Image (spheres, helix red, strand yellow):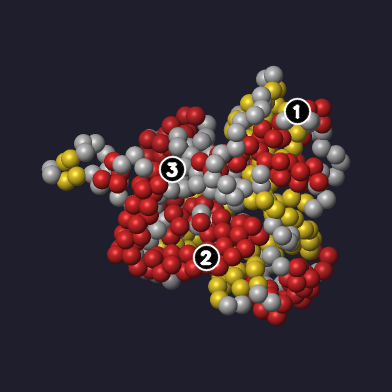
């Protein structure tokens, strides 16, 4: 991940971000930082970038042209137009789910304002996101940008030594973090809770959950009400957990918000990925939910995951009527969910070595590109999606005799998305090795492994059954707006 910061004080950003965890990540190449001094683009001998506001008033306003030229100097270096974040009390409040959303970007540009603000015309021209870190005013945007960059950085691949740290902390599952203790066992007559000294992992987990619930109920009743609602939603989905494991995992990892939960059905929205999950009790309720999705707030919807056949039968028509789309814009495909329902890891019965690939490693990039060159014509989009997974640290490689022979990519929800073994290396256990390592890794994180398999892919279905995954009794349907190219 690469950060670009447009600022009047680049040394402040460089010094603060270059220390501690983010500093080490910069040294390793997991993060990149590029600061741009807006004064360098002022067209006067004093490098002046501010002027009096039209209409009068106290203070000065940053001029549009230096800011725009600083932005243009960065945009020209980017492969795609990146999101531009202007930190302002007038923006969307920064929360953990927004940090996760931003962490999926390859590049971000931050614009740090000063004085009384920035000329509105350049904000209209370049800014994609207005974000606030709270209802108060700072002397400049640098500190707010650093807060956001720090929260986003720790979610980027390879930044934290412990990959689980980003998941199990404050705001996980809408709960505040449980109390933490270290040595000594007794300090000023205060004892470490006996549950943490028991060595019983199950007992420790129960204690931590209870403490997190108690702390959230006392300190953040608003969060606790949301937590109770989400738990009730989970209980309903567990009635058919094989079909709804995607929705359950999104709730458990706080990756989706509950749009609707009542007697007619459940609807979740992951607005960061543009994915909506729908499960309805009966057709009329399903149609009402689809019409709600295509309302102004969520229009247009790039991807829908539909959990009943009657939804698939009406979704394209409803969305084409209400979301300003043409019937040909929508692509519908059916997948059969498979879920690993056991808690015990799979035994390692293979010789291939499986490692998590690093998107910043040039040698690995070349090896993956060479392996994917075997893909048949017409699979260019699939190849691009796989390379994006690599860049975002969501790919595992299967090596044998020192050579990359297969890859497994996670989708943005953490589920298995793409398993590919080079044609010359098949029937040697490479695919089994990759999926075994993937399943065991998710189990270590407390996750439930699942994937969706195309119904015509009999070989992949056979592998799932051989590994012990359970198929759902019915398929689900994925409806994609091809015009939006969601990359889902």
Q: Is residue 21 above or below residue 238?
A: above
Q: Foreground residue, 126 or 426? A: 426
- Helix or strand or loop: what does disc 2 sit on? helix
Answer left or right for 79 relative to 36. Answer: right
Residue at the bottom extreme of this rendering: 284
3D distance between C-alphas at marks 3 and 1: 35 Å
3D distance between C-alphas at marks 1 and 2: 41 Å
Q: Is residue 160 above or below residue 269?
A: above
Residue visible at 32% across and 55% down? 211
Q: Position of residue 232 (x, y in %)?
A: 49, 68
Residue 428, label in figure: 1
Please report whichever mark, 3 or 2, sits nearer to the chain's N-terminal start.
3
> Could you tell me if residue 73 is visible in this image?
no
- Helix or strand or loop: what does disc 3 sit on? loop
Which corner quadrant of the image does residue 463 belong to?
top right
Residue visible at 49% across and 52% down? 99
Please report whichever mark, 3 or 1, sits nearer to the chain's N-terminal start.
3
């Amino acid at each position: 991940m690469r950060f670009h910061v447009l600022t009047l004080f680049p040394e402040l950003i460089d010094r603060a971000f270059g220390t501690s965890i983010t500093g080490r990540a910069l040294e390793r190449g997991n993060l990149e930082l590029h600061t741009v001094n807006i004064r360098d683009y002022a067209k006067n001998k004093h490098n002046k970038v501010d002027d009096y506001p039209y209409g009068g008033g106290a203070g000065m306003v940053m001029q549009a042209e230096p800011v725009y030229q600083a932005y243009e100097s960065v945009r020209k270096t980017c492969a795609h137009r990146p999101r531009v974040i202007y930190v302002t009390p007038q923006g969307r409040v920064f929360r953990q789910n927004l940090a996760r959303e931003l962490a999926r970007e390859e590049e971000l540009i931050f614009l740090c304002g000063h004085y009384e603000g920035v000329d509105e015309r350049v904000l209209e021209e370049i800014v994609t996101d207005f974000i606030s870190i709270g209802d108060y005013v700072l002397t400049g945007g640098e500190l707010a940008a650093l807060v956001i960059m720090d929260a986003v950085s720790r979610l980027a691949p390879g930044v934290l030594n412990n990959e689980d740290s980003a998941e199990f902390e404050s705001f996980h599952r809408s709960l505040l973090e449980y109390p933490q203790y270290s040595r000594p066992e007794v300090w000023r007559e205060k004892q470490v809770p006996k549950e943490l000294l028991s060595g019983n992992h199950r007992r420790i987990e129960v204690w931590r959950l209870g403490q997190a619930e108690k702390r959230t109920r006392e300190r953040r009743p608003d969060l606790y009400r949301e937590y109770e609602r989400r738990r009730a939603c989970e209980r309903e989905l567990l009635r058919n957990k094989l079909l709804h494991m995607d929705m359950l995992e999104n709730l458990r990892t706080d990756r989706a918000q509950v749009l609707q939960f009542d007697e007619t059905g459940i609807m979740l929205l992951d607005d960061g990925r543009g994915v909506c999950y729908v499960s309805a009790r009966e057709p009329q309720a399903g149609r009402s939910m689809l019409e709600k999705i295509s309302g102004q707030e969520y229009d247009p919807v790039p991807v829908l995951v539909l959990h009943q056949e009657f939804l698939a039968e009406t979704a394209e028509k409803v969305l084409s009527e209400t979301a300003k789309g043409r019937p040909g814009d929508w692509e519908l495909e059916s997948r059969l969910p498979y879920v690993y329902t056991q808690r015990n890891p799979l035994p390692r019965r293979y010789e291939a070595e499986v490692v998590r690939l690093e998107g910043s490693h040039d040698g690995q990039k070349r090896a993956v590109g060479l392996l994917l060159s075997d893909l048949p014509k017409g699979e260019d989009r699939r190849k691009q999606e796989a390379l994006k997974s690599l860049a975002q640290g969501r790919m595992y490689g299967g090596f044998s005799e020192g050579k990359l022979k297969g890859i497994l990519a996670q989708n943005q929800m953490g589920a298995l998305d793409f398993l590919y073994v080079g044609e010359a290396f098949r029937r040697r256990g490479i695919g089994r090795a990759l999926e075994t390592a993937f399943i065991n890794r998710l189990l270590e994180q407390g996750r439930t492994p699942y994937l969706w398999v195309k119904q015509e892919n009999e070989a992949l279905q056979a592998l799932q059954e051989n590994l012990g995954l359970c198929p759902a009794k019915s398929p689900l349907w994925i409806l994609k707006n091809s015009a939006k190219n969601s990359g889902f």
